[in-house]
Image (cartoon, rainbow, N blue to C red):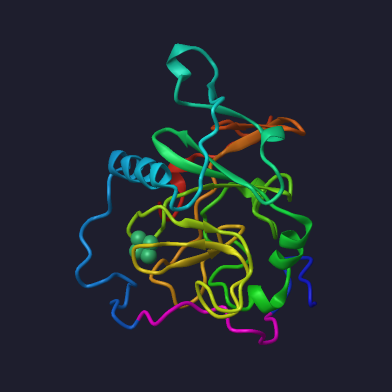
Amino acid sequence: MAVQTDPQTAGPAPSGPDFSGPDFSGHDSHGHHPESGPRRDFLTLLTGAAAVIGAGAFAFPFLDSLAPVGGPDAADATVDVDLSKIAPGQQIVVVWRGKPVFVVHRTPKALLGLQDTNLTDRLRDWASRERQQPDYVVNWHRSIAPEYGVMVGICTHLGCVPGYVPNPSATDPVANWPGGYACPCHGSKFDLAGRVFQGAPAQYNLPVPPYSMPTRSSLRIGLSPDDLDFDFSTIRQL
Ligand code: FES
């Protein structure tokens, strides 16, 4: 397995298995479907996410111990997550500022896969050059701790909630699937770090919110680490 260890400096990778998605020829030059309407507002997104989870379609358990912190005025500003409740390979969805946020516990095998040039060759922005995340997570895993991914679960095409499809497959949802996220609306695919595949209607990686890790087993979504800052409104595309 070829491995990229420095996403900031490594050059183009050799070709490998085809991770490309389905035929997107029905979309215009900006990747938008001709019949697509305006992007959904967050309330609609949240309602949609809850409906999907309620139906069990994506098996996203909401964390039952969401704990807004910081007093009444900050009730929606930060959300604490107990990582000890997330088994390797599992994902939970929490709500931060009205948005679904994926918190995924990536396995060692998944982490190796994220560095494999057979995968990164097929990503539009494998090195996270577009501003879709804080500077402090611009690395090959797009996170603070490699094993825990934290991403806003809103497709950067038209705002649907991508489904969690973590297991590699030779055929499903596309040939040589490495595990990641599949958007049910127009077929965009993302890897387990939220990096979008080439050829998808979505043009940008899933956003990463500001967050910190008060302990090795906890997250505080909405608050950057000490001495660091990130204004989420400055991302390129939500
Ligand atoms: S909203 Fe169109 S592919 Fe996700």
**Extreme top residue here?**
71
**Extreme front residue here?**
55
Write down which quadrant ligand 1 falls in: bottom left
Q: Is residue 12 visible?
A: yes
Taking the spot 61% from the left edge, 67% from the top edge, the residue there is: 126
With respect to residue 85, does 71 lie above or below? above
With respect to residue 141, does 211 lie above or below? above
With respect to residue 12, does 138 lie above or below? above
Q: Is residue 157 visible?
A: no
With respect to residue 188, does 61 lie above or below? above
Overall secondary structure of the magenta section: loop
Based on the picture, tell me whether residue 38 belongs to the magenta stretch: no
Where does the image place residue 86, in percent across and percent down from the top left? 66, 39
- Magenta stretch bounds: 12-24
Where does the image place residue 207, in percent across and percent down from the top left? 50, 51
Taking the spot 66% from the left edge, 46% from the top edge, the residue there is: 136
Front in this rendered view, residue 64 or 150: 64
Where does the image place residue 10, in percent across and percent down from the top left? 73, 73
Say whether residue 176 is left or right of residue 57.
right
- The quarter in which the N terminus is drawn is bottom right
